[in-house]
Every structure is written in structure tokens, then in C-alpha cells.
Amino acid sequence: MRVLVTGGAGYIGSVLVRILLERGYRVRCLDRFFFGFDPVRDVEDDVNFEVVKGDVRFVDGSVMDGVDAVFDLAALSNDPTGELDPEKTMEINYRGRVRVARLARKHGVERYVLASSCSVYGFQDGLLREDSEVNPLTTYARANVLAEREVLPLSDGRFTVTVLRQATVYGFSYRMRFDLAVNGMVRGFFKNGRVPILRDGTQWRPFVHVRDTSRAFVKVLEAERELVDGQVFNVGSNEQNYQIFRLAETIADAIGLPFEYEWYGFPDHRSYRVCFDKIAGTLGFKPEYDVRRGAREVYDALKDGRLDPDDPRTITVKWYKHLLEMREFLKEIELDGVLL
């Protein structure tokens, strides 16, 4: 079976690609490689792995040739990045992913899985389930909601569509991100001996390890069609719903450092607790990692040099700003006639 992974060189995608290869699948990775080719370099010689450099908005339908399933992860990731250019976010995260789903259906692909986010719940009280009202507060979250609403009706008996609303992801990846709550807190401890906490610390957020959420995609792929067709699943575990201040305390304890912290930013307007009973009961999904183990994993990788805390590519919004500035710089050079 061949699986197309859009965004296959990203934070989740680079982990998911390796899990698929380990399980004997053939993998086609579609990515723009804005963060470089390194996240997939060590698997590029695998006979079951192939790369297509392209954009979900424009890629030719031939990318679906021989594909049995699509994992659609390509997107401008996280809320701050989504606000850099809201229209571009909608173009990629919403219309681009709907385009991929329609291409997949047109070319006879059997399964399509959309990578969505629990951020669609926004700010709400109570324990939120898949049938709870959504309340998207950012462009990133709104794009996810719109994409969900357009891809789910594409299920037609031959084409199976599933939506995975992922909790906030953490843990070591081949395309590392330190702009995620757990990872960013660990980086703060490592660099400054203090954990950065987004005000006011009372906000709730669910969490899931990057390997666990990758395993959820595989669970959907290998499940009986009737269990996942047209379904939405929250991906995570009830035990990993945390208030942010308590999360920081847990991380400090896990890596054995005194709990020193510093506040940053304006009070977060997002807060939600999520129920994960459906994916556990339907697919038997149970995370193998918890926040404590994930925090130690990242801290150890920083200590032994496998991760660079100062790599500018690990803060997504800053790296995109850098790319935008470079693009403007190159345009200026072209206008001056220096670059022909």
C-alpha cells in the first residue's frame, strides 16, 4: 500500500513517515521544504520512500498515481503563523486541503485523513466531545473548521474520509518545533533555568506526543472502513488535559529542576478541555507517552546536542518572517539589476 503524506517533512509528518516505513508501507512525501530537506534526509535512500517537492494548491493530480491513502498534514502551522497572512492561511489550510481531498477522490484513492486540531474548540467550559459546538477564535482554527466541513461530505462508499482533531503536540521530532507549549517550556528551562508561561496560566489545553498522534493516523488507516468513514476523532487522552501553570510544574518535576518561571505575552483567550473516549473506544487508541516522559526526552536531546535550542527554524512564525524578509530582499536585488 502506498500512502501520500502531505507535509511529510514537517513536525508531525517527519515522524509519521518513519512509522509508516517501519510498518512496511510505501510512502510518498509531498512538501514545500521551507524548513529544509534534513527532516527526511536519513530515509531518502529507502526504496519505499519518494519525495515530491510541491504545493498542495498547485500540485498536479499525478501525485495521486498509485496512491491508496492520503494523510493530509500540509498547512501553515499554529495560531501566530496563521495571522501573518490570514488570506494565505485560508488559501493553504482550507482551500488547499479541500483540493487535495477532491484530487484524491477523483483519482481513486480509497482513504483520506485530514489533520485538524482541537483548537477548533476555542474557549469553552466542560469536557468537549466531537459533537460539541466548535468555537474557532483564530484564522488557523477557522481554516480547520472550514476544511472539515468540506471534506467530510466527500465520503461516498468508495472514498473514506476521516478527520483527526489533534491535541497540542509535543516531543522530539526530526523537524523540531519549540513554539509548542511543552517543548517551549523545556527549552526555557534548558537555556535560562526558567520556564516561560503564557499568561495567565489558568487556561486549559490537551496534549499528545508526536509519536502517539502519528500512531493515531496509522490506527485509522488500518481500521475497518465502517469504523472511520465520515468520522471525527479527538486525538489525545483525558489524563493529558492540563492547566498551563500546572503543566509547567509537571515539566519542572519531570526533568528534576527547581520550579522557576517567567510570564510572557497577553492572557491567552483559548481554553478548552477535551474528551478522548471516542478514539479510545472505537479504535483502541491509547497514548504510549505522557508529558513527563516527553519533557525528559526533549531535555535529554538538548543536553546531548541532538537538538539546537537556537536553531531559528524551530520557531515557526519567526522562520516564516525570515523567509518573507528574504523574499523582499531578493526582490530588491533583482530590481537593482544585481541578480539576473
Image: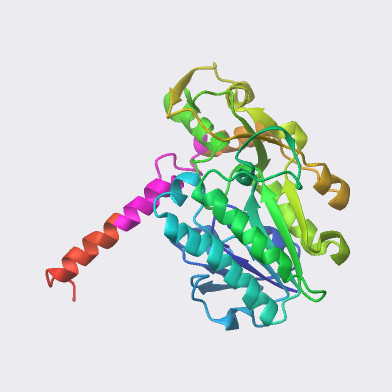
Residue 95 pos. (x, y %): 54, 66
Q: Is residue 137 left or right of residue 65?
A: left
User: Quick one: quadrant of the C terminus?
Assistant: bottom left
Residue 93 location (% of width, % of height): 53, 60
- What residue sits 51% from the left and 77% below the top? 59
From the viewer's perspective, is residue 226 above or below residue 307? below
- Can the viewer see residue 46? no
- The answer to whether residue 36 is visible is yes
Q: Quadrant of residue 161?
A: bottom right
Q: On the image, which quarter does residue 288 sit in?
A: top right
The majority secondary structure of the magenta stretch comes to helix
Quadrant where the N terminus sits is: bottom right
299 over 44 or under it: above or below: above
- Residue 257, percent across and down? 55, 20
Q: Is residue 167 above or below residue 36?
A: above
Q: Which residues are magenta?
A: 302-324
